[in-house]
Amino acid sequence: MTNTINARGSWGSRIGFILAAAGSAVGLGAIWKFPYVAGANGGGVFLLVYLACVFSVGIVMMLAEMMIGRGAKKSATSAYRELGKSQWHWAGWISVLCVYLILGFYCVVGGWTIAYIVEAVKGDILTTDAKVLSDTFTNFIADPTASLIYTAGFMFITAAIVIAGVQAGIERICKVLMPVLFALMLFLVYRSLILPGAMEGVMYFITPDWSKLSIKMVLDALGLAVFSLSVGAGLMIAYGSYLSPETKVVNAGLWIAGLATMASVLAGLMILPAVFAFNVDPASGPGLTFITMPALFAQMAGGQILALVFFALLLFAAVTSSISILEPAVAFLIDEYGFARKSATILVSVSNYILLCIPAALSFGFMAEDMKVFGKTPFDLMDFVASNLLMPLGGMLAAVFVGWRIWPQIQVILAEEMHKHVLSWYRLMAAVVAPLLIAVVAYMTIKG
């Protein structure tokens, strides 16, 4: 065991915190997940509902978590106990369970990015034949040996950065990689938009088709909003706990939400136009990024080099997310049980790989049908439970906790950053609107 203060660490700068927190969303939440969820839910109308969710319920819950963490200087379970007394610590356990589930399937997708770096080096994926690309991706994820090896490699990279600590590991890598990733995304958006037939994809993405509006779509939008803002799983509580008292939480939160949203929109403009240009089904699912981007690179001068750089940066973006997912579980062991950072990281990583990553990685191969629970593979079940149930619930509890249990303390902090009318709106959203809306969504989700 070690001194928990030294094990926890702190942010070295405000921009370092913003980039690290935004990196939690700008990774696979934006580049991998947003385009295929938007593609499967009608494009434009989903985008509008998603944006509404982000800048109402989502940002309210994110700010609530950040303030809980900064106020207690602890991770979720310890923070709820310290600020709300013992009857609230169970809310932190929900966050720990949620983040543990996400890590299980997220590392599988992270492993895919490593595999595609290897494929880019070989040049085998540079083709415009959609069937070849689809078959290549399907065959890869169905290979149990390759999936398990690449998943383990991704988990190792994530754990190594978290072991290095907050400033030397998490903050340092995010300050370098995030600006580079945005620059490359802008370039790829340009290349995607000039493809023949790309404008059809643009119109699909920005034009709302209200006939596509449904309860399921709203559920998916809300689930993705809280997923992309990294709320509900204790991530922002953990990251907020490393903030200095001088940091303006509202300003930082708006920057994080803005960067996360911009990354999602750029990802949509990068991938969906290419989807239509190459006649790929926009509802292709989790493999959409891995099918369309190689086709785009195949049409570009120096495409192999760009493919290698893109999938390398996609890996880095995935890592900025995965370290934010692993960190709350590590902080939990440090705060609750006095673990050293290295020991906590190894324990969480190894146990998660054995218990969750392995079944998630095997969800697409020959065992897929035999492993289904409630009609879902382990991968899909982890994603559904974490993104559509536990994350909204965790965010709702954080909002209620701030809006009711510790509002007098929070009001004093927010009054320095918010106009009184905005402060009243925030209290209403946190204490009433967000919890009620999420309760309705959770009920509809369980009802089916």
Image (cartoon, helix red, strand yellow):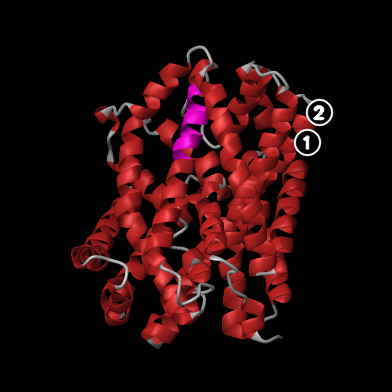
Q: Is residue 25 visible?
A: yes
- The disc at residue 98 is none
Bin the neighbour count of mark 2 within 10 Å (Cα to Cα): few under 14, some 14-19, many 20 and up: few
Left or right of 245? Residue 311 is right
Q: Secondary structure at mark 2?
A: helix
Between 222 and 22, the one lying in front of the other is 22
Residue drawn at 53 percent across, 25 percent down = 190
Tag of residue 118: 1
- Give yes or no for contact between labels 1 and 2 (Cβ–Cβ under 8 Å): yes
Q: Quadrant of residue 393?
A: bottom left
In the image, taking residue 418 as reference, residue 147 lies left or right, namely right
Quadrant of residue 17 within the rendered picture: bottom right
Pick whichever, 348 or 323, lies toward us.
323
Does dot 1 land on a helix, a strand or a loop?
A: helix
Q: Give whichever of 189, 373 is nearer the camera.
A: 189
Q: Is residue 142 above or below residue 281?
A: below
**Res. 446 image quadrant:** bottom left
Q: Amino acid at mark 1?
A: Val
Q: Is residue 270 magenta?
A: yes
Mark 1 vs mark 2, CA separation in Å: 6 Å
Q: Which residues are magenta?
A: 264-273
Q: Position of residue 51 (x, y in %)?
A: 34, 44
Residue 113 falls left or right of residue 283: right
x 81%, y 28%: residue: 122
Q: Which residue is tagged 2?
A: 122
**Magenta: predominant secondary structure element?**
helix
